[in-house]
Amino acid sequence: MKTNSGETSVLSGTTISPGMAEGQIYLYRDILAATELPTNKEDYSVDAEIDRLDCATVKITEDLLHLADRVEKEINLQLAGVFGAHSAILNDSLLKEELRKEIIDNLVSASSAVKSVFLRWENRFLLMESAIAREKGEDFRDISVRLRNALANVTGHALEHIPSGCILVAQRLLPSETVFLVNQLTRSVLLEFGTVGSHAALFTRQMNVPCIAGIKNILNVLPDNGYALVDARKGIITVNPNQKAKANFKKRIKQYGEALKLAKSSSRSPSVTQDGIEIVVNANVGCIADSRQALEFGADGVGLYRLEQFYIGRSVPPSAEELLEEMRLTLSPFKAKPVCIRLLDIGSDKPMPFIGFMAESNPALGRRGIRLMREYPELLNTQLQAILGLKKDFDVQILIPMVTTADDVTFVKQTLQSICAKRGIRPPLLGAMIETPAAALSASDIAPYVDFMSFGTNDLTQYTFAADRENAAVAAYYNDISEVIFRLIGLVHDDVPMMPLSVCGELAGREAAVSRLLALGVRSLSVAAPLIPSIKESIRKSNLSDYVPSR
């Protein structure tokens, strides 16, 4: 039911980027629109359409390079990698051949061929029922729109003209559209479609723009030019509030800002519970900008350093020397501090051009992380060689993704020990990610081969409940703050009580979960940089001697 102009209503959704904001509502309706010029059948030529397609491909490739450069400078390198991946997709030889075949066999325009072929590719990914595969489908939709607009000589974009300081309301935001938020000073974003792992979530979180998603039929229930109070901490939107509600909200925003400022001022100090237990709060990083921001917000070290962005969009994987250079730059703010590097977490649902697309009926349950590296050991060898090159300047730790059994760990450990023996150096600390129920239940079997364990609660929740966190149809089952997840964490602690435990998933950034995690034996949390101050404050308010967990 649509909220009428002046009528007060309260809506709720899912927070994908925290914060608070207020402002005028701006409805953005043409997100999926692409302009197509009518084809003159008398002038139609297959060769001409293929030439038009090739020219448009070259233009969009150049645009994507400029866009990646802009995002790297204005946001961060990790998100710039999205557009490097778009460029790789656009220039994929199989895709190009399918586009040409569509034009030749069906005698259609280049634009019609793009529309048909990209829709087929998009649907292939959507049918995988995987979170990351569906994001890849979103990428294909984005490229399709850009390419068809280039064929129609459309150079502008509607989001270039959104009002500054508005509450942007849309069905969804594609990666290239999210970039327009940087200079528009958009106060908040409200979406019908979007999840905590979507491109929209990654971009808005990085830009500190509050964002709430999951609002059904959003363009019909929210009034254009209405006024909204957005509490993206609780996922609540108040539409057309009265003056009293506005005044109260302004006070809450001020209190929220002051609390953040206070937390940030003390964020460089150790986080110690009221009963004297010091807890490490690290940062999740992917590029130099992330590391600098993490240091500014008081990170004790790096708890999760992702390598995927160095592989995205490449026709050949990076060499050990290239990888070492990139890692040394990214981690430079954390010399002499602990830095935990997660080995490459790619798989059939995150295909790389140099491996190719490995069709699997259910990629989420297929080859990814350590499973893929066991199949391609040269990938593992390159990463370990590069990581060991950091030991001279950094307190390096290595984290193995997607561990299921002890064999996954011993495979890495043996390779690592062999390389270290040849170099005459001591191996760095080795950890296992606990992100499958099997790993949690096998902790005592895995423990002899690792120095620490880190819970990846996003995947742990997904695999425990058999519920893809990107699938709206099963959203009610995906609950990372469920008692079940805490019981699994507690079970690991009970089975290996002397094992250092950390959490690097979304659950680590939830203030309400901090005391519970600490009571279950977790002594290290790794979160996005902006969350560090508030998580440290939550730790300082905790008193574990008074907390009796029920499990």
Image: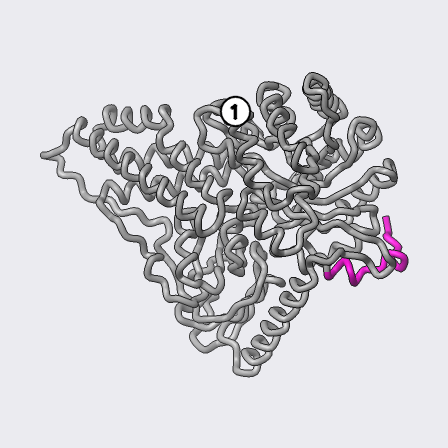
Q: Which residue is mark 1?
A: 319
Residue 245 appears left or right of 526: left
Is residue 180 placed above or below 135 in the rendered structure? below
What's the magenta region? 537-551
Query: Residue at coordinates 60% horizontally, 28% vertically from top-left?
Result: 386
Q: Residue furthest left?
A: 42
Q: Amino acid at mark 1?
A: Ser
Q: Position of residue 229 (x, y in %)?
A: 53, 70
- Residue sitting farthest toward the bottom: 244
Question: Which of 91/110 is in front?
Answer: 91
Q: Is residue 83 depicted above or below 95 in this figure? A: below
Residue 465 in view, yes or no? no
Most foreground residue, 91 or 271: 271
Does the magenta run of residues contain 546? yes
- Residue 402 is drawn in which quadrant? top right
Residue 414 percent location from the top left of the image: 73, 19
| Residue name at image x 60 percent, y 41 percent | 331
Which of these two is toward me, 68 or 91?
68
Picture coordinates of residue 202, whole percent (x, y): 53, 49
